[in-house]
């Protein structure tokens, strides 16, 4: 062609598996100002034709020459345009965030979480008031079902963990007390540790991972399916109908689970004490336990267990109501419910230890 333009005609069949012409052979040492690629009796084709045209465009762009493609099917031009797009460069990893920005963001997030928690607690308090006035949409059938799920169905795992905790405490305590020849003191240590702290806490941690996550997943799934919105549209309070039966079930069942955990923990310590090298008779171990454990210790554990049940229920329901309307949001809500529940349990146990010490319990 004239004016420094170069015309290239492409025809025949193009197969990626067969030998095909290369663009470098067509251009060689020429420096055209314009390249025209025209279809001429084109047969069947595949991506090899689009690759050839993409090479023509890339060469023309690199050599500041115009490129015109004529007479090709629309599908060829679309595929060539897709190949000509520049790949997206991966984002560069960002450095550490600014300290003040990260701190401010964490404070605002904590404040938002505190407001949501306070709102849910307030709604639950109003729901309790409606219940005693006989206006709450509360179903005991749902509460009894949840009591079975979080109570009777949790006995095996709570019992196993509590027994093993008693075994661990007895083994660890024996290392210390045997240095002073006070083997029998192992009953004192295991009895107080299990009944005041480890029994209620182990039961609470198990339920935080088992029941709290289940509550968050159930409510999150209902939110994703717009079932909670449907209840609100029908005039049914989700707090009365969904949240309160679950919180009440945990509140009622946690003291019983704590007592069960206490018994299994003491049994684990007793089993280790009766085995070599301690060889403490069972009746002597039980008599020593009765001398150190009184009713105030049992009441302390039961009060903690009831409070832990409330916290686990609130944490699970809060994360479920906050969940995004997606499958991923349900999973994230279950994970957040476990973390929040365990955090609240540890904080509440620390506060209770200080308060009971001040009161002399």
Image (cartoon, rainbow, N blue to C red):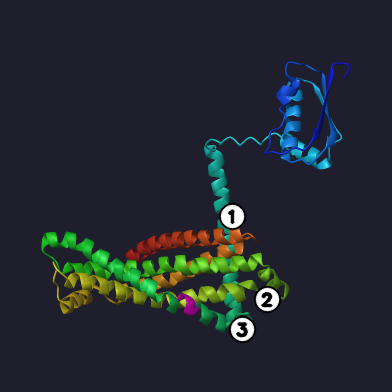
Q: Residue furthest left?
A: 181
Disc assigned to residue 134: 3
What is the C-alpha distance between the residues marked 1 and 2?
A: 26 Å
Q: Spatial distance from mark 1 to mark 3, Cα to Cα?
A: 33 Å
Indicate yes or no whether the magenta region holds residue 150: yes
Q: Is residue 345 visible?
A: yes
Foreground: disc 1 or disc 3? 1
Q: Is residue 361 magenta?
A: no
Residue 300 in view of the camera: no
State the image coordinates of residue 101 (x, y, percent, origin top left): 56, 40
Q: Quadrant of residue 65?
A: top right
Q: Tell which circle, 1 or 3, labels the residue nearer the N-terminal end.
A: 1
Q: Is residue 274 above or below residue 38?
A: below
Q: Position of residue 223 (x, y in %)?
A: 64, 66
Image quadrant occupied by the C terminus: bottom left
Distance between the Cα atoms at labels 2 and 3? 15 Å
> Callout 3 environment at 10 Å: few (<14), some (14 to 19), or many (20+)?
few
91 left or right of 361? right
Residue at left offset 81%, top offset 34%? 11
Q: Earlier in the sequence, mark 2 or mark 3?
A: 3
Determine which of the numbered discs, if any, sits on residue 89 in the image: none
The image quadrant of residue 2 is top right
Query: What label sits on residue 236 in the rendered view?
Result: 2
Q: Is residue 19 above or below residue 199?
A: above
Outermost residue to the right: 2
Q: Name the residue tied to disc 1.
A: 112
State the image coordinates of residue 157 (x, y, percent, origin top left): 38, 71
| Residue stretch in magenta | 147-151
Q: 158 or 180, which lies in front?
A: 158
Is label 1 in a helix, a strand or a loop? helix
């Amino acid at each position: 062609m004239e004016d420094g333009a170069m015309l290239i005609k492409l025809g025949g069949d193009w197969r990626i598996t067969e030998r095909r012409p290369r663009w470098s052979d067509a251009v060689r040492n020429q420096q055209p100002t314009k390249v025209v690629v025209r279809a001429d009796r084109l047969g069947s084709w595949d991506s090899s034709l689009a690759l050839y045209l993409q090479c023509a465009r890339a060469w023309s762009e690199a050599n500041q020459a115009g490129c015109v493609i004529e007479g090709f099917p629309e599908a060829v031009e679309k595929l060539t345009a897709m190949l000509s797009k520049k790949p997206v460069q991966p984002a560069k990893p960002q450095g550490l965030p600014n300290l003040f920005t990260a701190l401010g963001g964490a404070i605002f997030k904590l404040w938002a979480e505190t407001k949501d928690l306070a709102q849910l607690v307030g709604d639950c308090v109003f729901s309790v008031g409606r219940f005693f006035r006989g206006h709450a949409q509360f179903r005991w059938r749902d509460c009894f079902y949840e009591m079975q799920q979080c109570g009777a169905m949790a006995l095996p795992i709570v019992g196993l963990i509590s027994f093993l905790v008693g075994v661990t405490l007895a083994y660890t305590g024996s290392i210390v007390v045997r240095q002073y020849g006070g083997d029998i003191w192992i009953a004192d240590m295991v009895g107080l540790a299990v009944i005041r702290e480890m029994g209620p806490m182990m039961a609470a941690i198990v339920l935080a991972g088992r029941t709290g996550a289940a509550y968050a997943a159930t409510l999150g799934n209902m939110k994703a399916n717009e079932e909670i919105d449907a209840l609100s549209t029908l005039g049914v309070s989700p707090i009365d109908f969904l949240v309160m039966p679950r919180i009440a079930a945990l509140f009622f069942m946690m003291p019983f689970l704590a007592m069960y955990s206490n018994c299994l923990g003491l049994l684990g310590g007793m089993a280790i004490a009766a085995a070599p090298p301690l060889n403490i008779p069972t009746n002597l171990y039980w008599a020593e336990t009765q001398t150190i454990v009184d009713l105030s210790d049992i009441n302390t554990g039961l009060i903690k267990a009831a409070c832990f049940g409330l916290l686990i229920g609130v944490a699970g329901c809060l994360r479920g109501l906050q969940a995004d309307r997606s499958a991923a949001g349900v999973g994230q809500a279950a994970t957040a419910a476990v973390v929040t529940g365990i955090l609240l349990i540890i904080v509440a146990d620390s506060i209770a230890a200080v308060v009971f010490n001040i009161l002399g319990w």
